[in-house]
Image (cartoon, grey):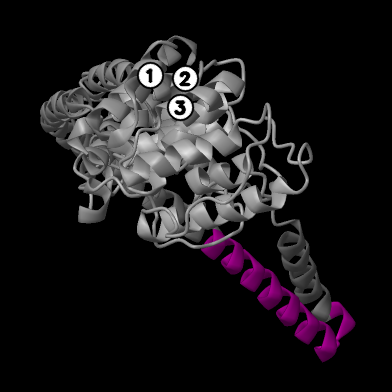
Amino acid sequence: MSTDLTASPPAAPELHRYAEALLAHLAAKGAAPPAAPSFSDIPGYWLPPAVEALVALLSGDDPLDPLSRAAGRDQQQTALFLCLALAVSGQGSRIHASWLGTAFGELSLDRPVSHGQRSLWLAAARGAYGPAGKIFVLRKLDALAVQEHADPEEWVQALVPGEPSVVVPPSLVDFPEMAEIPELARPAVAAARLARLRGRCAEITSARQTERDLTGALDRTSGSQGTTWAGDEPLAVLRSLIGSGGPAGPMASLHSYLLDDLRPGADPRLAAIALHVAAPILRGVAEELEADSSLEPPATITVPLLGHRIQLRPEGPEPSSLAAAEHAVLADGIVPRPRPWAAMVLLVAGVACFIATPFAGSILLAAAGVAMLGLGGWQLWQRRKLVEADALYAAAQVNELRELAEGAVWALHSYAREAETRAKQAAEDATELTRLIRRGPRAA
């Protein structure tokens, strides 16, 4: 874009000062400054006649002559300047139908969206140009067939980020590890995702414009002179057009803008347009999620219980897998213990001391024999207690395993009953989601 004001140095400062004052008045009051333009024309430069045409439009005068001169020098910049200036002043309905197309140019999936295009997109979404402006942007986006080049998962993540990897249905609250089994997890996760998508689409399409938005004015209370492309893009682009704006911020791709507009916290008017673009993608996703939510629970399933895998059937745990698990529990619970050689040696030594006492005639030898016999007996008693404790622990583990297996079977029965309700709710969510995205951005 041309912003060379050095062609006529005496006139350039006057043009620059008046253009800045004009934008300030438009943003604050929606009107041109009371003082008439006092700058001279600059041959070949589109801005002086464009400013004259804008002042004439705001004053109700005929802008045809300056408009023709400006368009002859740079038709696109002139159209962009007039469209954004009228939008900022709250008089976007006064633009000519052809200006918007000329100013906007062509969108492409392969090129970044220019700041001018994004600012017109933003103004149209806010209703600055009435329903026709919004429909214009929608048609531009529809012509690109974005859905044919989109990754559905990426769009779903933009709409409902931070989804849980595991969803524990009420029937499996006591057995959360079962909720991670793919055959059981897939319907629950699909139903939860479908419900979240429905809620997010309802949030976007039920948003209501404020009274100020309905008038078509754009951030007239914002008097910041800085370039903030994200929050005040139309006015920032206008300042750049007249040569008083700072360096342009980075441009983003069409794909990035649409995904950003869908994320929670985005402007609901921009989200409504992005949702319109995402509608074909979401319809396909909703159909897949509804199908996954309606999957029948498996007749048999293998679940991990106490670290052992047991096959469960509707009538109960499968006997052979349960027996194998019980055997493994007993093998793990009973610690193999070596023979009590130390106790046996003490007992033999104690008996030997008693046998040798009459021949040696020593009381100390007899006392040593008693001590060794006592110590050996105590060690055998301790070993017996440990073996009994192992057996009791293993038996308790087996009983717990059986109870868990029975409880898991009942949980599967509850899951099966819950599946019917989940399938009905998923069908309702899919139908409502389709209805919401069919309403389009005009519902916002």
Q: Which residue is mark 3?
A: 65
Q: Give how far apart the Cα atoms at labels 2 and 3 are.
A: 19 Å
Q: Is 129 covered by the magenta stretch?
A: no
Q: Residue at x 23, y 30 (%)?
A: 131
Q: Residue at x 79, y 82 (%)?
A: 368
Quadrant including the C terminus: top left
Would residue 63 be found to the left or right of residue 46 on screen?
A: left
Q: Which residue is mark 2?
A: 102
SS at mark 3? Answer: helix
Task: Name the front one of labels 2 and 3.
Answer: 3
Q: Residue at x 54, y 27 (%)?
A: 70
Would residue 391 be found to the left or right of residue 286 on screen?
A: right
Q: Which mark is residue 98?
A: 1
Number of numbered labels in the structure image = 3
Q: Is 377 covered by the magenta stretch?
A: yes
Would residue 17 be found to the left or right of residue 267 on screen?
A: right
**Label 2 neighbourhood size at 10 Å, few (<14), some (14-19), many (20+)?**
some
